[in-house]
Amino acid sequence: MRVAASDPAAAIAEGARWALTDGGIEAELCLGLGYENSGDWDAAERAYMRAHGFAEAAGDTRGTGILANAGRMALRNGDPASARDRFGVVLADSSLSDSVRGNVLIERSQAHVALEDGDAAQADLVAAQALLPNDSSVWLLSATLARRQGDFDTAGDFIDRALELDQTDPANLLEAGNIAIGLNAYDIAQQAWSRAAAADPDGPSGQAAARNLERLAALLAEDPGVPVELPDQSPGIEETDPQG
């Protein structure tokens, strides 16, 4: 598993040899991590599910965590329904720590979003907020989803909390600008996007913010009296996906 971080192919080869000698859970975890780090989500999912089967048969307590890994791979592999169901099984485990439960709730919210169930996704994120109150990413995800659902007041509350926790995160600043545009608060949007662009000039959030500033300036120059379209609706105003 250590090798998988630097040489996924070597980990896959070792895991395959190990599996042939009845390596059990450990061999499949070696394979799963190797495939995951090489971007082969389908093979990683199958390896993790085999490991989960071994764990269930042996009464091994690692089974819950392994199933969570299989859920993540299903989500990346374009099967959000399987991911949602696996995360549900994981969340039924009363022994989960608050940190693990909160992160699995975040992951299940992504599955809900992919299944176009925004209300269920937001419910999971709100539950995660209570478990991870000082994790700015939870509040950012909640803000982004609320904005996409058209609830700008709630989105504003969520992004304010994210910024309280991390005022320099370019993703938080980009989203703050996106929400401000939805409220026609152009000055606030410009300020937030300018800070995002300065903080992350070569990264996705900073570059999206810089392009948004250019687009906003062009739109206001064309007709300052016309409301600027929301980020999702305007091809010129961009956002990055905080879940991805």
Image (cartoon, grey):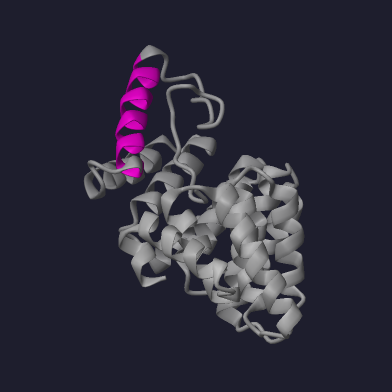
Q: Is residue 45 above or below residue 54?
A: above
- Dividing the picture into quarters, in which one does residue 49 lie? bottom right
Residue 239 visible, this orientation = yes
Left or right for 134, reference 43: left
Percent from the top left, x then y, of residue 69?
Answer: 59, 64
Q: Tell me the chief SS of the magenta region.
A: helix
Q: Is residue 219 magenta?
A: yes
Left or right for 1, reference 61: left
Left or right for 13, reference 217: right
Left or right for 132, reference 216: right
Residue 128 visible, this orientation = no
Percent from the top left, x then y, of residue 132?
Answer: 55, 74
Q: Is residue 90 above or below residue 86?
A: below
Residue furthest front as drawn? 21
Seen from the viewer's position, the closer of residues 34 and 185 is: 34
Q: Is residue 150 magenta?
A: no
Quarter of the image for the N terminus: give it.
bottom left
- Dividing the picture into quarters, in which one does residue 216 lie? top left
Residue drawn 52% across the image and 25% down it:
229
Residue drawn 56% across the image and 26% down it:
233
- Dividing the picture into quarters, in which one does residue 222 lie? top left
The residue segment tinted magenta is 205-221
Percent from the top left, x then y, of residue 239?
Answer: 45, 38
Q: Is residue 98 above or below residue 229?
A: below
Residue drawn 32% across the image and 58% down it:
7
Seen from the viewer's position, the closer of residues 63 and 95 is: 63
Percent from the top left, x then y, of residue 174?
Answer: 40, 45
Number of residue marks? 0
Q: Is residue 196 above or below residue 91?
A: above
